[in-house]
Image (tube, rainbow, N blue to C red):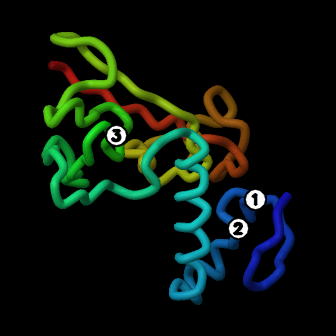
């Protein structure tokens, strides 16, 4: 159970990771979003991932997703899959193989399946979901895959 850093509301709906409640996100996005984004950057740093898409002026451009990273020498792309290896864009592991990177994300911002997810809609209750409505306090599995 967390407390909102803006209004102080205590609820199981308030994420300890996000730091703010949904009401404050909706009513005061100019105050709430910087808190959420700071928490997101700090979490990515703990995972060894760039806190934001890299924008190195002399980096290698990656155009495989919407982030359009410019990865600095020996640096990683925002996804954690691609690296600048001596001035060339290469996958973190393997060559001519599928490459996947995943991590548990407490900020479900990457979930493409949100509109149909049983844990979000409650449509899968009781077989695939724990509650009849949205579930809170769980992690989103963020997966990045590419085929070389």
Q: Residue 130 at x, y = what percent? A: 72, 37
Residue 85 vs 109, above or below: the answer is above
- Is 122 left, or right, of 57 in this rendering? right
Q: Quadrant of the C terminus?
A: top left
Q: Residues within 10 Å of mark 1 (few under 14, many from 20)?
A: some
At a point 53% along the width and 76% down the height, the residue shown is 33
The part of the image, by quadrant, that contains residue 26 is bottom right
Provide the secondary structure element on which disc 1 rests. loop
In the rendered view, tell whether residue 71 sits above or below residue 12: above
Which mark is first along the chain, 3 or 1? 1
Mark 2 surroundings within 10 Å by alpha-carbon count, few (fewer than 14), some (14 through 19), many (20 or more) = some
Q: Are marks 2 and 1 in contact (CB under 8 Å)?
A: yes
Give the residue at x 74% y 62%: 13
Question: Which residue matches tag 2?
Answer: 19
Rendered image quadrant of residue 94: top left
**Viewer-nearest of discs 1 and 3:** 3
Q: CA distance from mark 1 to mark 3?
A: 28 Å
Nearest the viewer among 88 and 122 is 88
**Who is closer to the viewer here, 62 or 17?**
62
- Above or below residue 82? Residue 100 is above
The residue that mark 1 highlights is 16
Q: Secondary structure at mark 3?
A: loop
120 horizontally vs 102: left or right: right
Q: Which residue is mark 3?
A: 76
């Amino acid at each position: 159970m967390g407390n909102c850093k803006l209004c102080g509301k205590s609820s199981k709906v308030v994420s300890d990771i996000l730091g703010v409640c949904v009401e404050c996100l909706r009513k005061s996005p100019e105050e709430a979003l910087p808190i959420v984004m700071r928490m997101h950057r700090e979490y990515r740093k703990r995972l060894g991932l760039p806190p934001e898409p890299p924008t190195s002026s002399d980096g290698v451009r990656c155009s495989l997703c919407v982030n359009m990273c410019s990865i600095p020498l020996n640096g990683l792309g925002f996804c954690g899959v691609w690296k600048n290896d001596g001035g060339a864009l290469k996958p973190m592991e393997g060559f001519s193989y599928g490459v996947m990177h995943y991590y548990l994300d407490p900020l479900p911002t990457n979930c493409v399946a949100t509109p149909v997810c049983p844990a979000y809609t409650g449509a899968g209750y009781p077989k695939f979901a724990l509650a009849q409505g949205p579930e809170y306090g769980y992690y989103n599995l963020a997966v990045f895959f590419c085929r070389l």
